[in-house]
Image (cartoon, helix red, strand yellow):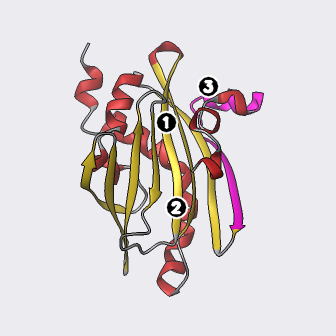
């Protein structure tokens, strides 16, 4: 992951990487995205980075980010997210994504970086995986007025084939929108009561 994005503190750190126009969009509540595509060996990777401010305190966002089984609520097309194994801050998270006839399964090796306020992940090639490769992070940081800056970055190769070609446009469209889906999960989901509690 460091090869793809640099250290988490640099890659996901904040709006310092953004232009003044992008910072203004963030302040206005807009999702800011920077897309990226590249060929790396046999991998045809796409993804990039994105940022969004959410209207919840950072401790609420961080608690939600560490709730790995809830990832199905904000990963595009995901129907299942189950922890297969956990040891300390590291866990194997089994993901299932479905769209019509397409049924994709893989396991993410996740690491909770407590000091960075981030969860790092990569596809575990030692276990059955229906996508070729994937690396990334999602991070939360305090923002002014009790809000939270969510930053996300990923590069993925979901493979080839007829069914994959069907789902690829949806994955490409929604991958960098994960901070937006996370915002919906926070503001409208099961954490609403916790957010409202003084």
* CA gap, disc 3 and disc 2: 30 Å
Other residues around mark 3 within 10 Å, as few (<14) / some (14–19) / many (≥20): few
Please say whether residue 21 is one of the residues in the magenta stretch.
yes
Residue on which the image places disc 2: 134
In the depicted structure, whether residue 78 falls above or below residue 188 = below
Other residues around mark 1 within 10 Å, as few (<14) / some (14–19) / many (≥20): many
Front position among marks 3 and 2:
2
Residue on which the image places disc 3: 27
Q: Are marks 1 and 2 in contact (CB under 8 Å)?
A: no
Q: Position of residue 109 (x, y in %)?
A: 39, 55
Residue 67 occupies quadrant: top left
**Residue drawn at the location 42% of the way across and 75% of the way down:** 130
Residue 58 occupies quadrant: top left
What secondary structure is marked by label 3?
Answer: helix
Please say whether residue 181 is one of the residues in the magenta stretch.
no
Q: Position of residue 134 (x, y in %)?
A: 52, 61
Residue on which the image places disc 1: 139
In the depicted structure, whether residue 148 falls above or below residue 89 = above
Q: Earlier in the sequence, mark 1 or mark 2?
A: 2
Q: Which residues are magenta?
A: 19-39
Q: In the displayed structure, does residue 131 sit left or right of residue 94? A: right
Other residues around mark 2 within 10 Å, as few (<14) / some (14–19) / many (≥20): many
What secondary structure is marked by label 1?
Answer: strand
* CA gap, disc 1 and disc 2: 17 Å
Q: In the displayed structure, does residue 130 sit left or right of residue 149? A: left
In the depicted structure, whether residue 142 falls above or below residue 125 = above
Front position among marks 3 and 1:
1
Residue 111 occupies quadrant: top left
Q: Earlier in the sequence, mark 3 or mark 2?
A: 3
Q: Are marks 3 and 2 in contact (CB under 8 Å)?
A: no
In the depicted structure, whether residue 124 falls above or below residue 56 = below
């Amino acid at each position: 992951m460091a090869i793809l994005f640099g250290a988490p503190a640099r890659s996901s750190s904040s709006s310092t990487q953004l232009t003044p126009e992008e910072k203004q969009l963030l302040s206005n509540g807009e999702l800011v995205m920077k897309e990226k595509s590249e060929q790396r060996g046999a991998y045809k990777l796409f993804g990039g980075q994105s940022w969004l401010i959410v209207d919840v305190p950072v401790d609420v966002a961080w608690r939600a980010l560490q709730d790995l089984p809830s990832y199905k609520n904000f990963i595009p097309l995901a129907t299942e997210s189950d922890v297969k194994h956990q040891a300390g801050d590291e866990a194997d998270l089994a993901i299932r994504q479905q769209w019509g006839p397409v049924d994709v399964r893989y396991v993410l090796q996740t690491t909770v970086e407590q000091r960075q306020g981030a969860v790092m992940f990569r596809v575990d090639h030692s276990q059955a995986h229906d996508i070729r490769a994937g690396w990334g992070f999602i991070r939360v940081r305090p923002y002014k007025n009790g809000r939270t800056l969510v930053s996300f970055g990923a590069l993925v190769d979901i493979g080839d084939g007829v069914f994959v070609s069907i789902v690829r446009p949806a994955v490409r469209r929604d991958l960098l929108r994960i901070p937006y889906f996370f915002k919906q999960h926070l503001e409208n989901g099961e954490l609403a009561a916790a957010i409202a509690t003084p």
